[in-house]
Amino acid sequence: EAGALWGGRFAGGPSPELTELSRSTQFDWRLAPYDIAGSKAHAAALAAAGYLSASELIDMTAALDALLADVTSGAFGPQASDEDVHSALERGLVERAGDLGGKLRAGRSRNDQIATLVRLFLRDHSERIARLVLDLIDALAAQAEAHPNAIMPGRTHLQHAQPVLLAHHLLAHCWPLVRDLERIRDWRARSDASPYGSGALAGNTLGLDAGLVADRLGFSVVVENSIDGTAARDLVAEFAYITAQLGIDVSRFAEEIILWNTREFGFVTLSDSYSTGSSIMPQKKNPDIAELARGKAGRLIGNLSGLLATLKGLPLAYNRDIQEDKEPVFDSVDTLEVLLPAFTGMVATLRFHTERMRELAPQGYSLATDVAEWLVKQHVPFRDAHEITGKLVAHAEANGLELDEVDDAALVAISPHLTPEVRSVLTIEGSVGSRSGIGGTAPERVADQRAHLTERVRVL
Ligand code: ARG
């Protein structure tokens, strides 16, 4: 059987149905460079323990390098009879190194190999994804800086609530992304242990130096428990969670862009390069990137859920179910690596209609809280202040007025505390400017926040 890694105790080869089901090269072949890096490190450990002579190590390493070159150029690839990336590469090695190639498998198992390779893959992609998230944070922060004084209607329950700076709102989308970056950093620390040397589950008898292998592969330490090293996939699930959380965080801004881009809101215009047209309606310009971002979040959540379902109740140690870890997490990585650059480009090229935002900001009685807090400053208990302001809003609503249009006589009729001076807080600049506590929307606070964001990201 070409490519099979066993045979001694088997009377016949695998059935074609089994081969079909078992094959994973269609998705694990992308791990080939990591597999070969692991093999080179393992060869060094075999040599250090006396199982390969110095010249054998040189020949083995050369054969592995030649194999890598052929994998990279496409000259070598998996065959239909190869079960997985490991079997295919062993076939390739034996083709190049002859009997010497058959020595490499000593003291390792595909179980410790695959656990290591998935970690290596995710560690590389975690860096790439972190850079893409940083680019998105930069784009959001640059838009915030470009609009330092623009005021928009802040919402709760999607209703006008209180005016806020556009910059404050944009930065509010940055902080979850910063925490996602911190999650990636924490994950990297936790994933910095090599499972290589765990063997099938119980370690190996050959006295191989797993620390040497770990070091060559860029891990700081070796896993403490060989069963854990081969059977655990919590780190894969955690990575899938981080990608899902990123998708969710991006989807929340995506949804707002979709709303803001409607005629009714009219808050933004998308760049032509980052929007799409309609095949039938010539006038259309659609926010497809934002919609795809919203949709991909569902896919990322699905990948996480599927993986968790696979792991639930799985007994120790390695079970073939575990092979199902790769497709979902690979898909999550690929999805984000395509989505984030497009989303960042859309954000960077958004045009904001700040006059439109400004016009809507005071509407919907969004300054009512300012009136109530002004009354508190006149020593009216907040309970009464809330009641008085509620009456003011009811009066304005009944008469089709905004708060600053209610005349003096009507004000005192509602409450003697409502003197004409209350109008000093009925401007959106006044409202925004007075929210000057830590984390508030006052311009100087938002400028501080912007600076803190840069510091926080710098240490990552
Ligand atoms: N291809 C498998 C995986 O991705 C590794 C092979 C382990 N197979 C086995 N029969 N122990 O998990």
Image (cartoon, grey):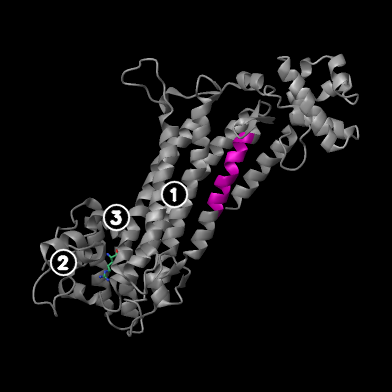
| Residue 263 position within the rendered picture, expressed as x and y whole percent measured from the top left | 51, 19
**Which quadrant would the N terminus be assigned to in this image?**
bottom left
Disc on the earlier residue, 1 or 2: 2
- From the viewer's perspective, is residue 40 above or below residue 283? below
In the shown orientation, is residue 279 left or right of residue 261?
A: left
Where is residue 79? Give x, y as percent: 15, 58
* Residue carrying label 1: 128
In this figure, which residue is indicated by the disc labeled 3?
30
Mark 3: few/some/many CA within 10 Å (<14, 14-19, 20+): some
The residue that disc 2 covers is 3
Specify which label sits upstream in the sequence, 3 or 2.
Answer: 2
State ligand 1's quadrant.
Answer: bottom left
Residue found at x 75% / y 28%: 368
3D distance between C-alphas at marks 1 and 2 = 34 Å
SS assignment at label 3: helix
Stretch of the chain drawn in magenta: 169-182
Which type of secondary structure does the marked residue at label 1 adopt?
Answer: helix
| Of residues 152 and 450, the one drawn nearer to the viewer in this rendering | 152
Numbered tag placed on residue 328 in the rendering: none
Residue 199 drawn above or below residue 413 = below
